[in-house]
Structures are given as structure tokens and as C-alpha cells.
Image: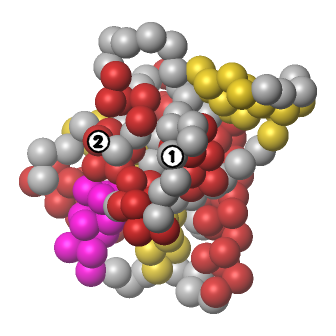
């Protein structure tokens, strides 16, 4: 699995790269948001770890730009610990938010969890090589590959979790899911 790490603190970046590589991830590290966005546009990544406070483009703006085109798990790391900061990060499109200082083992657990959910529990991946994973229901079109939802032709913005829940429900019409089942399929 390939990860993009955008962290402007060189020591922390080097330590995270070492830990991620030790856990068999391929990692490209960059030190500002603009470079990170260029890397992401030039290559395919399975996930991104973004610092919020970076030069040239902060992690929040980068997250917004990533979400315009990509559906990879994004984990924000930041020294900002206020509840509002976390809420802003998650509503911008991040899938998880870790505050500094953090235990590297916790970050690894979160990376593994997000990548597992993205890779293994993604309904589109259950049918690899199968038919198109676009769902059309009445006036709603859901496109799994691009994480786009259209109602009467108008694009609707959803967070990654909202999209995953909508796609899960739409891909199983008539089925009733318990809260635990949704949690298991979408959040884990």
C-alpha cells in the first residue's frame, strides 16, 4: 500500500516514514501542501497523512482539493487540539484526526484501520473486475469510483463516511441494516 505523508517537521516526518516503512508501507514524504498535491496528482496513493499547519498550502485546503478528485483515506495530524479544530478537519473531508503529540502505535492502528476499511470493506471492491459500480435509483446517481452523488443531475457534496453509508444502503435495496452492521461495514 502506498501512502503520501505531508508533514513539515522534518524530524517527525523522518520518524513516521521509518515506522510506516517498517510496517511494509511504501511512503512518499513531502514538506508542504503544494508539493503534496503535485505528488497526489502525479501518482496513485492508497491513503494520505496530512499535517494541518504546513507552508504554501495548509492541510485543510489540501484535504478539500484531494476530495474534489480522490476517495483515499485521509488522516489529519495536528498540534491543534480544540474540539472545533477536530470538527473542522473531519468535516473538510478527513477520515480521522490525530493530535500531536501522539503515540506512533496509535497512528499505525488508525492507518491500518482506515486502509482496511477502504480496501476490504468498500462495496465496490467486493466485485473487483465486475460491472460498473454506479448505482441509479430514481433521481439519484451514485458513482463509487469518484465518490460523486447527483440528485436530478445536481452534484451533492457528502463526507466520506456519509458517502460510504449511502452507498452501502443503496447497494442493498430493501435490506434493513442495524446500527451495529453499519458501524461494522463503514466505520471499522
User: Can you say whether 110 is above or below 160 in the image?
Assistant: below
Q: Secondary structure at mark 2?
A: helix
Residue 17 as seen in the image, left or right of residue 7: left
Q: Quadrant of the N terminus?
A: top left
Give whichever of 130, 42 is nearer the camera.
Answer: 130
For label 1, the SS is: loop
Question: Callout 2: few (<14), some (14-19), or many (20+) C-alpha neighbours within 10 Å?
Answer: few
In three-dimensional space, the C-alpha distance between marks 1 and 2, rounded to whole angstroms, equals 21 Å
Q: Residue 175 — which label?
A: 1
Q: How many marks?
A: 2
Work out whether residue 12 or residue 187 is closer to the camera in this orientation and state it: 187
Residue 44's spot in the image, x, y percent?
41, 26
Mark 1, other Cα within 10 Å: few <14 / some 14–19 / many ≥20: few
Q: Which residues are magenta?
A: 103-115
Left or right: 156 in relation to 81: right
* Residue depicted at x 25% and y 67%: 109
The residue pinned by badge 2 equals 120
Q: Residue furthest bottom?
A: 82
| Residue 31 % position (x, y) | 47, 51
Above or below for 30 versus 129: below
Quarter of image, res 88: bottom right
Direction from residue 136 to residue 73 in the image, left or right: left
Amino acid at each position: 500500500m502506498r501512502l503520501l505523508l505531508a508533514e513539515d517537521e522534518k524530524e517527525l516526518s523522518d520518524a513516521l516514514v521509518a515506522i510506516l516503512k517498517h510496517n511494509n508501507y511504501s511512503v512518499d514524504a513531502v514538506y508542504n501542501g503544494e508539493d503534496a498535491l503535485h505528488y497526489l496528482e502525479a501518482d496513485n496513493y492508497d491513503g494520505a497523512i496530512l499535517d494541518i499547519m504546513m507552508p504554501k498550502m495548509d492541510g485543510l485546503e489540501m484535504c478539500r482539493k484531494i476530495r474534489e478528485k480522490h476517495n483515499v483515506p485521509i488522516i489529519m495530524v495536528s498540534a491543534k487540539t480544540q474540539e472545533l479544530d477536530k470538527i473542522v478537519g473531519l468535516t473538510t473531508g478527513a477520515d480521522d484526526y490525530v493530535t500531536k503529540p501522539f503515540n506512533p502505535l496509535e497512528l499505525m492502528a488508525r492507518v491500518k484501520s482506515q486502509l482496511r476499511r477502504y480496501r476490504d470493506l468498500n462495496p465496490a471492491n467486493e466485485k473487483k473486475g465486475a460491472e460498473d459500480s454506479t448505482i441509479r435509483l430514481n433521481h439519484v446517481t451514485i458513482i463509487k469510483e469518484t465518490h460523486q452523488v447527483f440528485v436530478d443531475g445536481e452534484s451533492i457534496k457528502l463526507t466520506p463516511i456519509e458517502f460510504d453509508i449511502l452507498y452501502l444502503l443503496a447497494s442493498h435495496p430493501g435490506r434493513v441494516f442495524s446500527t451495529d452492521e453499519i458501524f461494522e461495514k463503514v466505520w471499522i
